[in-house]
Image (tube, coloured by chain):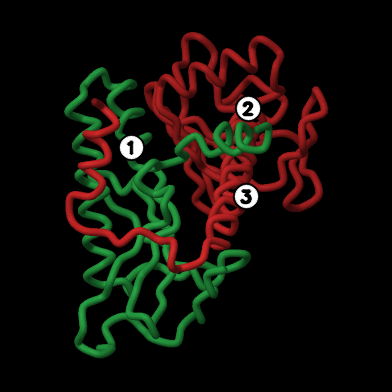
């Protein structure tokens, strides 16, 4: 069987230059790749659309994908995902530059970075709310319509 | 210190007394909104865009004053507080507490999206 997908160590769906990109659709138990059986997935040729990172290599322990280079965390969940052209091109650039071992690793790292940033913001927001909650109620300012606009206009003067 | 409101004692939609809710702002809230407006004006290069955001914040506060119990209750460390989002894309966030006894909603903070909380808090810590 001719492999339909080449590339990264987790079988990132980056076609050879003349192949364009691929979309891989998980169908379940049975699947074909252009009429050929490929693991339990079906590969559908598409143009610059969706890249799915999956393994076409030897079977591993169920549910566990390989660790990647550069100390990246192991890929433990297989999901079908879509990328914009721009996002995918950037992810591929990172992989080609050796910054990440696979598109999966690059996408995971970006999401984790966003999560950490959000967590940090949430903690700070929380701390700020709790700090403000120390103020006695009688020191609050009564709101009336237009109060904020007045403050904004005054600040602009 | 402002007493933390009891969570879940009154559900949205239930009539309280028929009297309108009062809305009170933490003294730093107007500054929050002014900074949001300026930030939008600066990054967009459109001063009217900044003012529109402030108008959206006004609308958000008006909505809270109208139906304070509709805000999403928060949990964890912010248990007892509520969050309400507004604005064109829902990026304005108000955190407030409902004091049923005083028929008052107290707004503690208004933020825009991530709203530079990281840098602002860092500056405050350094001060």
Q: Tell me which chain the residue with mark 1 is part of.
A: B
Name the quadrant containing residue A96.
top right
Q: Residue at x 42, y 63 (%)?
A: B96
User: Chain A is which colour?
Assistant: red
Rendered location of residue A14, percent (x, y): 55, 21
Rendered location of residue A7, percent (x, y): 64, 20
Q: Tell me which chain the residue with mark 3 is part of.
A: A
Q: Tell me which chain the residue with mark 2 is part of.
A: A
SS at mark 2?
helix
Please state if A112 lies on the left or on the right of A90 as rendered: right
SS at mark 3?
helix
**Chain appearing in green on the rendered image:** B
* Position above or below: A86 against A52: above
Cβ atoms at labels 2 and 3 below 8 Å apart: no
User: Which residue in the structure is indicated by mark 3?
Assistant: A123
Q: Nearer the viewer, mark 2 or mark 3?
A: 3
Q: Residue at x 46, y 68 (%)?
A: A137
User: Which residue in the structure is indicated by mark 1?
Assistant: B34
């Amino acid at each position: 069987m001719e492999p339909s997908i080449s590339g990264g160590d987790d079988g990132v769906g980056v076609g050879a230059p003349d192949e364009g990109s691929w979309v891989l659709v998980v169908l379940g138990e049975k699947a074909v790749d252009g009429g050929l059986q490929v693991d339990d997935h079906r590969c559908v040729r598409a143009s610059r659309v969706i890249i799915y990172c999956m393994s076409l290599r030897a079977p591993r322990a169920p549910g566990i994908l390989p660790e990647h280079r550069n100390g990246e965390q192991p890929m433990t969940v297989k999901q079908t995902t879509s990328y914009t052209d721009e996002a995918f091109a950037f992810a591929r650039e990172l992989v080609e530059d050796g910054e990440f071992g696979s598109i999966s690793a690059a996408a995971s790292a970006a999401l984790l970075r966003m999560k950490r940033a959000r967590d940090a913001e949430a903690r700070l927001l929380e701390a700020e709310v709790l700090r403000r909650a120390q103020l006695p109620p009688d020191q609050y300012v009564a709101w009336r319509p237009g109060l904020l606009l007045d403050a904004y206009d005054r600040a602009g003067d | 210190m402002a007493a933390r409101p009891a969570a879940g004692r009154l559900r949205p939609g239930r009539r309280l007394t028929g009297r309108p809710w009062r809305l009170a702002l933490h003294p730093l809230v107007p500054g929050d909104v002014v900074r949001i407006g300026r930030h939008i004006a600066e990054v967009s290069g459109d001063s009217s865009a900044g003012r529109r955001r402030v108008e959206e914040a006004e609308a958000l506060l008006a909505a809270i004053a109208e139906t304070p119990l509709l805000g999403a209750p928060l949990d964890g460390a912010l248990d007892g507080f509520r969050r309400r989002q507004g604005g064109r894309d829902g990026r304005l966030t108000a955190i407030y507490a409902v004091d049923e006894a005083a028929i008052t909603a107290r707004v503690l903070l208004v933020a825009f999206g991530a709203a530079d909380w990281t840098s602002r808090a860092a500056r405050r810590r350094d001060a």
